[in-house]
Amino acid sequence: MSDIEIAQQAKMKPIIGLVKEKFGIDAEHLDPFGHYKAKLSLEYVNSLADQKDGKLILVTAISPTPAGEGKTTTTVGLGDALNRIGKKAVMCLREPSLGPCFGVKGGAAGGGYSQVVPMEDINLHFTGDFHAIGVAHNLLAALIDNHIHHGNALNIDPRRIQWKRVVDMNDRALRHIVVGMGGAANGYLREDGYDIVVASEVMAILCLATSRSDLKERLGKIVIGYKTDKVTPVYASDLKAQGAMAALLKDAIKPNLVQTLENNIAIIHGGPFANIAHGCNTVTATKTALKIADYVVTEAGFGADLGAEKFIDIKCRMADLKPSAVVLVATVRALKFHGGVNKEDLNKENLSALEKGFENLQRHYNNITQHYGLPCVVCVNHFTFDTEAEIGLLESLCAALGANCVVSKHWAEGGAGAENLAKEIVNIVDHREPGCTFVYDENISSWDKIAAIATKLYGASGISASAKIKAQLKTWDESYGKFPVCVAKTQMSFSSSPNLKGAPSGHTVEISEVRLANGAGFIVAIAGDMMTMPGLPKQPAAERIDIDNDGKITGLF
C-alpha cells in the first residue's frame, strides 16, 4: 500500500480525549480543528514553566539523495518505539509546505507505518498556519508600497527595498517581477519578487518567538529596506505594521497537536526549510514538549550540515536548549548513490559503491561528535532491497568508525521495528548531562562564522564573495555582530554544487548574496545559485494528486 492508503486506514482517536489520556491536559486548554487536530493554548504552555525538562533527541540525516533517507519517518518511528518500551515520549515536527507537496517530494508526514495523521490534512492546509504567515508577510509588503504611494514620509528608497512577497507554492515565474505598472494610481513602478513562504522571515520569527510580546517585538525589528541616504534602515515598526501582523498570527503561534498511527502525540508547528532558512520547528513546540514528556524526539531539515548545524548554532543558542543525543539516518540506497550509482540501479547490490559513499556518512558523524559535541547513533532505515552483505558491510564500517549502528524497520513495522533504536538512545541520554558545543563563537565576525561552517563542516578550503558582500557584512557587524549565520545552500552536497556527491574536500564556497533577518536575529548567507523560490519539476507531484466524489484524496504520497 502507498503511504496515503496506510494513513487512510488509521484508527485515529479523538484528539481531545487522547491528549487528556496521555498527558492529562483538559479540553479547556485545546482549540479543536475537527476531531483529530487541535491547538494548545499559550496560557497552558506558560503554566508549564516550572516543570522539569525531559531529554531532547535530534534526528538528522546524511546528505539527501533521490533515493530518500526517511528522517521524518524515523522521528515518528523512534517516538512510537519509545512509547512502546514504556517511556513518555512526544515527537516535534515541522509543518509541510504545499510547494514540495505538489513538486518533487510529495507529502511530508512520515511514511509506511511510521506516520502522523490525519496525513492529508497535515499536508494540505493543516490548521492554516502557513496561510497566516504568508498573509502577515504580504501585509507588510502592501504597507511598504502604500506608504511610498502616499508621499513616502519615511524617505524609503524604492531601489533598496529588501522585503519581497511570498506564496506557499513553487513558482519560478515569480522570482523576478515588476510591480506598480499601470500608472501612478497603481503605485511606484519598481522591480520586486517572491520567495516561498518557508523562506519568509516571518516564518523564522514565528519559529523562534517565545511569546506574543516577543513575536510582536521581533516583527517590529524587521528591516524592510533603507532610506534615500542609503545607510539608514527602515523597520516594520516605522510603518506601524507589527501589531496587525501579530494579530494575523494570533492562532498560528499556538502549537498543533496530532497523533501517530499508533495513537501517540506529535506536535507539528512551524516549517522553515533548512536549505534556505533555519530548518527547525518552533521553540514554543519544543519547549512545551520538554515540559510534558520525558523524551522529546525532534528533527531538523535535510542533512546534518544544514538542519543539525542550524538547530545547534541558531535554535539551541537562542533558546538555551540542551540536546542529549543525535540520530543520524542513512539508507543503503542513499549511500550507494553517494558512491556513484544511478538512481535506477540502487536496488542492485553494490558493495564497492556503498563503501565509497560511506564517506558522506562519516563526515556527518564526525561533525556531530566533534563539532556539535553530541553522542550519535547511526540509524540504518531498512529497505526491502537491502542485502545481508550490504547491511553487514555498513555495520562493519560504522564499527570501524566507532559509531553505534542500529538497523531499524520502522517503515514496515512501525514502533515495533524501532525498539532497538529506542533502547540504544535511552541508554545514552539517561547516562549523560544534556548539552552541546557550537561550531563558532558568537563574538567573531560574520565572515569568520561563515568560514567556520564551510571549513569545519563542509570540508571547504575557504569561502569567497564580492567586495560588496564583504563590505556589507562588515557594516552589519557593527550593529548585529553577535548574530548567528544561516547558510542557504544546496542540501544535496557538502559543497555549493548539487552535483558533488560523497564528501568533497578543498572546494571554495562562494557566497553570492547576504540578507539581514533582524527580527529573526540572524544573517542569511546564500551560497552559489541557491534559490529562495523553487520551481516545479518536469513531472510535478500535482499531476498524480486527485480527489474523488466522496472526498477521498489519492496520489499525495
Image (spheres, rainbow, N blue to C red):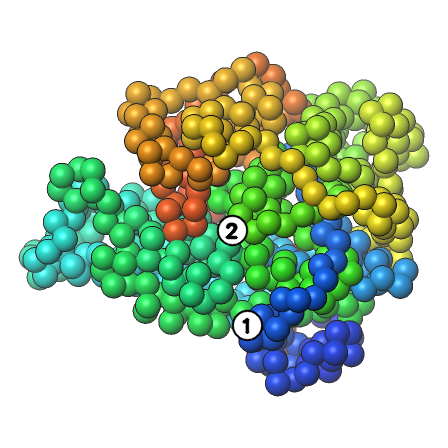
Rendered location of residue 516, percent (x, y)? 36, 41
- Nearest-to-viewer mark from 1 and 2: 1
Q: Residue at x 47, y 62 (%)?
A: 130
Q: From the viewer's side, name the closer residue of 189 and 473.
A: 473
Kindly indicate the quadrant of the structure image that contains residue 465: top left
Looking at the image, is mark 1 or mark 2 earlier in the sequence? 1
Coordinates of residue 58 in the picture (x, y in percent):
70, 47
Q: Which mark is residue 42?
A: 1
Which residue lies under the disc numbered 2?
A: 272
Q: Is residue 59 above or below residue 398?
A: below
Q: Secondary structure at mark 2?
A: loop
Q: Residue at x 58, y 70 (%)?
A: 46
Q: Quadrant of residue 504?
A: top right
Identify the residue at image location x=78%, y=61%: 294
Q: Label 2 amino acid? A: Pro
Q: Residue at x 75, y 64 (%)?
A: 293
Q: Residues within 10 Å of mark 1 (few under 14, many from 20)?
A: some
Q: Is residue 475 visible?
A: yes
Q: Which element type, helix, strand or loop, lies under badge 1?
A: helix
- State which quadrant residue 402 falls in: top right
Q: What is the CA distance from the residue labelled 1 to the residue labelled 2?
A: 21 Å
